[in-house]
Image (cartoon, grey):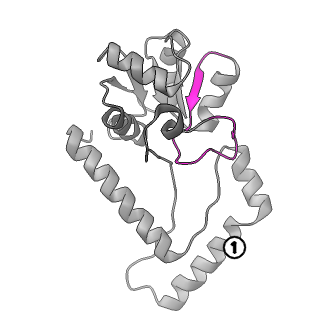
Amino acid sequence: MLTANPSVPVKSTRELIAYAKANPGKLNYASAGQGSLIHLTTELFNLSAGVKTTHVPYKGIGAAYPDLIAGHVQMVFASIVSVQPHVRSNRLRALAVSSAKRAKAQPDWPTVAESGGLKGFGVTQWYGTFAPAGTPRAIVDRLNREIVKAAHDPELASRFAADGAEAAGSSQQAFAAHVKEENEKWSRVIRDTGIKGD
């Protein structure tokens, strides 16, 4: 979720982009560290929106919240579950979710793409299951079937939803295509911004 300190005079992603363009480099954003998903997501946002914001890395996103709430750092892309208490208490303002479609956990919040006019923008934190190369096909197929079955279990789905997550089992081919797309997207962001790891 993209959130901002309430002292920033914006109430939407489009307004945040306009403010950042009018004040290049003056907005600081927090991340969970150099090369973290939050860092990469914000740099993708900067590239997509044509803005410049200043990276302030922390040792984990929890360490950033005091500075975000105090206004020393003005914005962050963080998981719904970690940022939601601060949004509910009005210490941070929710602007949008970073996923390509609205989150089931918070369907009223728009996406960055729709609220900021950034067509094609979509970032989610995802987890996948991999097997060693050479694992027999029958075992890989069985693992895939069982994982997809578990991902569609209503009880598991409701537990994920409580944490702002969605279970999404898919075919091996669809997952392989997703991994390829992600590698291409993040390679491009790293190349275009010159990001280096710690």
Q: Position of residue 38 (x, y in %)?
A: 43, 37
Q: Position of residue 74 (x, y in %)?
A: 45, 17
SS assignment for the magenta stretch, majority? loop
Name the residue located 48 percent from the left edge and 15 percent from the top edge. 67
Residue 78 in sight in this render = yes
Q: Is residue 184 found left or right of 31 in the rendered image?
A: left
For residue 173: magenta?
no
Rendered position, 32 above or below 183: above
Rendered position, 176 above or below 105: below
Rendered position, 82 above or below 160: above
Q: Position of residue 160 (x, y in %)?
A: 69, 51
Name the residue located 71 percent from the left edge and 48 percent from the top edge. 161
The region drawn magenta spans: 90-109
| Residue 163 falls in image quadrant | top right
Rendered position, 90 above or below 98: above
Residue 195 in sight in this render = no
Amino acid type for the residue under numbered disc 1: Lys
Q: Position of residue 170 (x, y in %)?
A: 57, 70
**Quarter of the rendering occupied by the N terminus:** top right
Please name the residue that numbered disc 1 is placed on.
149
Which residue occupies the extreme right position in the image? 155
Q: Element at badge 1?
A: helix
Relative depth, front residue between 117 and 184 = 117
For residue 92: magenta?
yes
Relative depth, front residue between 69 and 188 = 188
Q: How many marks?
A: 1
**Quarter of the rendering occupied by the C terminus:** top left
Name the residue located 53 percent from the left edge and 26 percent from the top edge. 3
